[in-house]
Amino acid sequence: MIDAPLALAFTAGMVASINPCGFALLPAYVASFVAGDDASIAGHRRIARAVVVSLAVSVGFAITFVAVGVIFDAASGWLRQQMPWLTIAIGAVMIVVGIAAIAGWKPRLPFRGPEVTPSRSALGMVGFGFTYALVSLSCTLGPFLAVTGFAMQRSFVGGLTTYVTYALGMGVIILALSVSAALAHDSLVGTLRSMSQWAPRLAGLLLVASGAYAVWYGRHELEVYAGDLQRDPFVEFGLNLQTRFIVFTESIGAERIAIAVLAVTAVAYATLRLRSARLASAAQ
């Protein structure tokens, strides 16, 4: 059993993985992860790759959270109040990229495609983790600092540990998505191929919607800092979605969810590896 501050950070990280600002990047992650698998690769190897990729993404999370946490721990209150402008800027970039995708532009992702070398793929996934964490923080910076900020005040090492634990909480959700994609590889490949013509445009629509929410959220935060405490139904809609995930996570327990994800991953790997060994033995 981990201590209360780390347990809180781990739970908050899980919850933060599902947020209106970063959610649009998850379909692109799953699609790119599946696209990077050769259909001939054995199932247990796809599970192993899911674990490695999730670890790489989690490293990107940790780098982002440690950097942001250390910077804001040393920052003045004035600098923190300027964060909504960064939220608005990130949202604006997402809108532009989304519109470009709708118009037919296909961005080149460093981790996409089976031809990418393992080392480059790992670096690409770290980059994805950095990007996803930064975009997510545009909507979750307040809760992130509230959960992790006090740890840095106790000790520098304790603060870093809390940030990494927060990243691991997000990483568990990414691992669950990755393993699910690996297990459903064949059906996903067929679906992605049938969606190949309009999926980028759908992703573009999601990016535009998420970017618009980020811009609106940043505008709302500026109004709050200016003293306007009126409720915003659009912002509350996004917060309500997160609240439902919080209630679900707390009802089960973040530690239990993590153990279940790891157990399913281990069992799936062992089962698929045993089946692969039996098929290889029968073919001899």
Image (cartoon, rainbow, N blue to C red):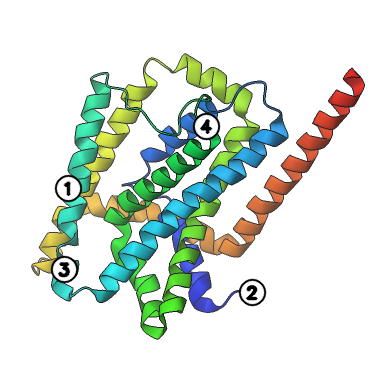
Counting from the top left corner in percent of width and height, residue 175 is at 56, 47
Give the class, few, some or many, for how many residues have Cα within 10 Å of label 4's Cα (few <14, many ≥20).
few
Q: Residue at x 35, y 74 (%)?
A: 149
Give the class, few, some or many, for how many residues have Cα within 10 Å of label 1's Cα (few <14, many ≥20).
some
Q: The residue tagged with tag 3: helix, strand or loop?
A: helix
Identify the mark at residue 79; answer none if there is no mark. Answer: 3
Cα separation, mark 3 vs mark 1, equals: 16 Å
Cα separation, mark 2 vs mark 1, equals: 40 Å
The residue under label 1 is 89
Cα separation, mark 2 vs mark 4, equals: 39 Å
- Give the label, 2 or 4, closer to the camera: 4
Amino acid under label 2? Met
- Give the label, 2 or 1, closer to the camera: 1
For the residues labelled 4 and 1, say whether their Cβ atoms are less than 8 Å apart: no
Please state which of residues 37 and 2 is positioned toward the viewer in this rendering.
Answer: 37
Q: Earlier in the sequence, mark 3 or mark 1?
A: 3
Q: The residue tagged with tag 4: helix, strand or loop?
A: loop
Identify the mark at residue 117; answer none if there is no mark. Answer: 4
Q: The residue tagged with tag 1: helix, strand or loop?
A: helix
Cα separation, mark 2 vs mark 3, equals: 36 Å
Q: Earlier in the sequence, mark 3 or mark 4?
A: 3
Cα separation, mark 3 vs mark 4, equals: 41 Å
Identify the mark at residue 1; answer none if there is no mark. Answer: 2
| Residue 274 figure quarter | top right
Q: Residue at x 84, y 31 (%)?
A: 277
Give the class, few, some or many, for how many residues have Cα within 10 Å of label 2's Cα (few <14, many ≥20).
few
Q: Earlier in the sequence, mark 2 or mark 1?
A: 2
- Give the label, 2 or 3, closer to the camera: 3
Amino acid under label 1? Ala
